[in-house]
Image (cartoon, coloured by chain):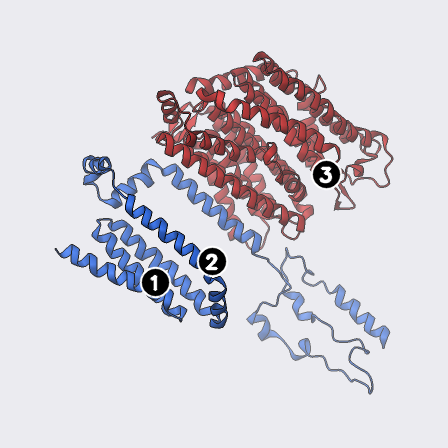
Chain colours: A blue, B red
Amino acid sequence: MTPIILFYIFAIILLLSAIMVVSVRNSVHAALFLILAFCNAAGLFMLAGAEFLAVLLVAIYAGAVMVLFMFIVMTMQTELVQLKEGVQRYMPVGCVIAFILIIEFILIAIHWKVDPKIINQFSNSPLQHISNTKALGNILYTHYVLLFQICGLILLVAMIGAIVLTLHKNPNNRRQNIAKQHRREPNQSLEVHDVPLNKSIKDIGGFIRPKETYYGVTQEDSFGPKPGDKSDITEKRQQREQIK
Amino acid sequence: MNWTLAIPEIVLTIGGLIILLVGAMQKKKNSFFSSAIFLTAIFIAAGFLTLTNVNGLAYYGLFVNDEFSRYMKLLILIAGLLTIILSLDFNKKNKTTYFEFIALITFSTVGAMIMVSSNNLMSLYLGLELSSLSLYILCAIDRNNLLSAESGIKYFILGSIASAILLYGISMLYGSTGAMEYDNIHKAIVSTNYTNMEFVIGLVFVLVGICFKISAVPFHMWTPDVYQGAPTPVTTFLSTSPKFAAFALFLRLMSGPFGSLSYQWQFLIEVITLLSIVIGSVGAVSQTNIKRMMAYSSIAHMGYAMVGLAAGTTNGVLGTIIYLTTYLFMNVGTFSIITSMTKKGKIVENIHDLAGLGKSDPGIAVAMAIFMFSMAGVPPLAGFFGKFMVFWAVIQVHLYVLATVGIVASVISAFFYLRVVKIIFMDKASECLDHRSLSISFMSFGMGTLTVIFIIFMGPMVHVGKVAAQSLFNLS
């Protein structure tokens, strides 16, 4: 009797929170309801005897994915007005799709039946006496250990790709170097000019940018000017002298 | 569980991981060259381990080792090794000396080797994904170059669609036979005469996925753009290693699990073969960019190699194996010369930039001429024997249309190969190419010598190839 009561409790909370996910305005609230839905689904799995799935659902979905989702929701600004416009625009198409879906669901529900052979097979299988976690571990780490390792390699390659294609070691960006900042003298960063009347700073040669101080920061294998290479600064200096 | 059967793959993987670790730890110095040297040693070690490995099944039937897989693995390892040597100078010039480059080539090679040894549809798919995912990244590795980025994206999107189709096909095969292992699929086909719809659709989808990998004709659209955009050492790698792996898959699938269904797929293979040969040969005629030309040429070459598959006999498989071996030498040789094509430090790719090479650098010009003649199939050179073997096999099974069209297309393809020779020796140059570097000389002369003296080790080669081809048919 208790499992049935538990089932109805979990199922009702699951359905209600799922409805709340799509109906609340505030996306943070929606995400929180989604976590509630996941937890209840995990409870349902637990009742069905799939304890490993339940743990996975809580650990991965409620734990990792939802935290990421919350993070994105909180860093993005979603405008409600735009969302509302979308509702009116896509309403007819959405209704048609929903109608088709409902008909499909009804058809499935009418024709749904479980093959009695499957039930027999499960009750006779040697897996009956092994826990889910153990059975999954057997498959993953013993029978399919090669595939498991290749999957790991594939993920590693994907990670390498993401890093090598996006990480630009750009020496010209002004990354903060605190030691450098503390050692800096005013005359390294300040330029004081006497600007004559009716003339702009450009006419007397302009500021020299980047200042000398930046040139010490560049790394050995960078594309920019090497440490100690002040050729373009000296060039600008000469240009300024000529203008003067 | 006989895990030592996969020892070459394990050694390679560990080598790649060490490179990643060292490269990431070392902040100050660029570890590209040291890792390249290290991996050259690892590749050679893996080659020896492959040679001395024993036959058998491992990892609960997921992995198979036989003469055929050993032969193809050696080809793949040689291709990877030569690519690393080629990339030494090119990447320095191109400022793409990332240690990840070397690691990705290693992982792609590992994927290709797993494809060769796969005995299960799942290890097939994962090996293919590992090999192609690395290739997508390698294509785009010169990320400041727009063409390189375009080629990476193009290859990635089209490749993903192809592997999705392959996966769909695999799921259909699984659904209709209830098995993932090649042996069990074979048993299911034999026991119940499988001509049902899902099975045939699954078979065709798997075929399409592999045909995309070897850029056979209806699925060749990506080839010219990707070959042109990718850095030249990557193009070299792209035109050798994954193609060998895909061919190994093709041969293994078609002779093993689907062998008894040859009446279902043979016509399909014939059509794809014919189209590849004709469109590859005709498409290359109008190209002026030498990498695009080589892309079409490789489409045609894959067509020729598939002729052996269309024959569906041991001799056909032998022909394909020999063809791929000769293709490796002449293709890598040609690409090594393309890699050296720079003018005042700038990379040039037009065919007419080769003009005057005969006067300015006769050695490399002769090497290029050897490769071009060999690709056209002129008798004493390696390319001729490959073509001879496949057409001989196909005539034995009375597929005369295939043989005739193939030989006619071969004559057409001679036009654009000989045009390159004509430009090198007879046209006047406005500006000479830069002097070649040591690795390029080594590669082009080494490959040129192999192409010329192939006639000498033809006998032992055919013997080894025959053993490999027979091992493929024995297993099923």
Please, what is the three-letter code of the amino acid marked with disc 3? Answer: Ser
Instruction: Tell me, yes or no, whether the two marked residues, 2 and 1, touch with CB atoms within 8 Å.
Output: no
Q: Is residue A46 above or below residue B263?
A: below
Q: Nearer the viewer, mark 3 or mark 1?
A: 1
Q: State the SS at label 3.
A: loop
Disc 1 target residue = A34
Left/right of residue A31 with respect to residue B466 in the rendered view: left
Q: Nearer the viewer, mark 2 or mark 1?
A: 2
At 49% across and 48% down in the image, what residue appears? A158
How many numbered circles are shown?
A: 3
Gap between marks 2 and 3 measured at Cα: 58 Å
The dot on residue B330 is none
- 2 and 3 marks on the same chain: no
Please, what is the three-letter code of the amino acid marked with disc 2? Answer: Val
At 52% across and 27% down in the image, what residue appears? B72
Instruction: Tell me, yes or no, whether the two marked residues, 2 and 3, touch with CB atoms within 8 Å.
Output: no
Left/right of residue A156 with respect to residue B348 in the rendered view: left
Please, what is the three-letter code of the amino acid marked with disc 1? Answer: Leu
* Chain for disc number 2: A
- 3 and 1 marks on the same chain: no
Disc 3 target residue = B340
- x and y percent of residue A39 in the render? 28, 60
* Chain for disc number 3: B
Disc 2 target residue = A93
